[in-house]
Amino acid sequence: MINPAPSPREQRKQEKRQRILAAAAQVFSDNGFSRTTMSHVAERADVGKGTLYEYFPSKDDLYYSVFQSLVREVFAGLSLDRERETAAEELMELNVMMVANMEGFRDHYGLFMEFWSASASSHSRERFQEGFRELYTLFGDHVAGILRKGVSQGEFRDDLDCGALAASLVCAWDAMGLQAWFDPAFSPGRVANEFMRVIFRGINREE
Amino acid sequence: MINPAPSPREQRKQEKRQRILAAAAQVFSDNGFSRTTMSHVAERADVGKGTLYEYFPSKDDLYYSVFQSLVREVFAGLSLDRERETAAEELMELNVMMVANMEGFRDHYGLFMEFWSASASSHSRERFQEGFRELYTLFGDHVAGILRKGVSQGEFRDDLDCGALAASLVCAWDAMGLQAWFDPAFSPGRVANEFMRVIFRGINREE
DNA sequence: AAAAAATGACCGACTGGTCGGTCAATATAC
DNA sequence: GTATATTGACCGACCAGTCGGTCATTTTTT
């Protein structure tokens, strides 16, 4: 153990922090950044307004913390370490996880949208941009890695631009989630599957 | 002539309306909705604050008008009516136009992001959602139409789910623009071309 | 064609309300 | 009893939207 021992005091503090974070996520998600007030968050978290400021220095910081915790949650929902025999299997499994994630995070898409737009114009846009860039490059690199593995194992054609293709896959998945949020009739599962079918036919080496 | 004659007064009014709209687009784009003040817009448009309210009933309305005018501009940048011999040609030409649009609108992506998020949580989310849905279904239907044409002409495989595939193409293009905005190193041209190459291999009937 | 009258575009000081953040008072933990 | 945590009343910066008044332009009158 590196961490000595969480004093009960410290522990309660962490719990309260989490409670505030959860309440904030909820309220931000329902009302958007500028229409949520700190009092509202406090009420939802069942603490006094002043207490919020014991845990987070400002509204902006609270917002950013919600962002961070959601990003972490997204990563947690994706297990990127499971290795499979073939690259195709890995890619397919990734697709399944993405679709599951899209459906699981449907409620949070409003939040994500605002985070995007925060990274465009918010007061603390740099932090958000940085966070997103990290997310995308990490994920994109992972996908590119799978593609390269497939190429070197002779599963996929060897004339692929793996970096570019990985980027476009990430884009497509990303935007499907967005569409699904927009349009209740949109079925990410159906669209993603048809999409992957075509992609596979496009990248597989013909025998 | 149906329109009788634009009195010089009326004409100047229209011009000023445009000037305000342009200034507002600029300021909203730079600062985001909630951080732009009407005074700021007025200053940028070089009119008095009260004048704004002669042309637009409220800040929300002004914002929505900027949205509308930008959507119109996007459509104008796309010529969807040009017919080509083959569906493949049409699709490729669409790709070229999309890439051109991504590059042309790079400066406006910040605005678009906020519009998205406005359609999530803004006070007038219904209007924005409606606008976006219209945009996407129109465009998606167009792409689906091209795919169906290709199928019936025997260019493309006949087992395609054209609706789903069209939706995923639209998603991919959409998100590429977004990525390009995020990451200056991202080359939409390169990514989109590689992407289309794979897609074509995936949808073409093998001989 | 010149003067008078009418119009409506234009303006910015002002108001009413909102909300992030503070801090003195209070409660709780140890 | 002291330290730590919590609270909500309070402050003041900020801003959308209003309104009474000004003035350039157009229309009507003479």
Image (spheres, coloured by chain):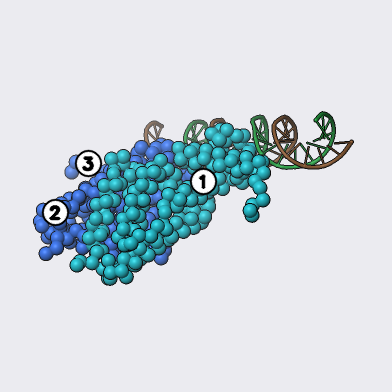
Chain colours: A blue, B cyan, C green, D brown
Amino acid at pointer 1 = Val
For the residues labelled 2 and 3, say whether their Cβ atoms are less than 8 Å apart. no
Q: Position of residue A184 (x, y in %)?
A: 42, 63
Identify the residue at image location x=24%, y=49%. Answer: A164
Local secondary structure at mark 3: loop
Residue labelled with disc 1? B66
Protein chain holding label 2: A
The kind of secondary structure element at disc 2 is loop
Q: Dot 3: within a 10 Å radius of its alpha carbon, few (fewer than 14), some, or many (20 or more) residues? A: few
Q: Amino acid at mark 2?
A: Asp
Q: CA distance from mark 3 to mark 1?
A: 54 Å
Chain of the residue where label 3 is placed in the rendered structure: A
Q: Quadrant of the C terminus of chain A?
A: bottom left
Residues indicated by labels 3 and 1 sit on the same polypeptide chain: no
**Badge 1 and badge 2 in a common chain:** no
Q: Which residue is mark 2?
A: A158
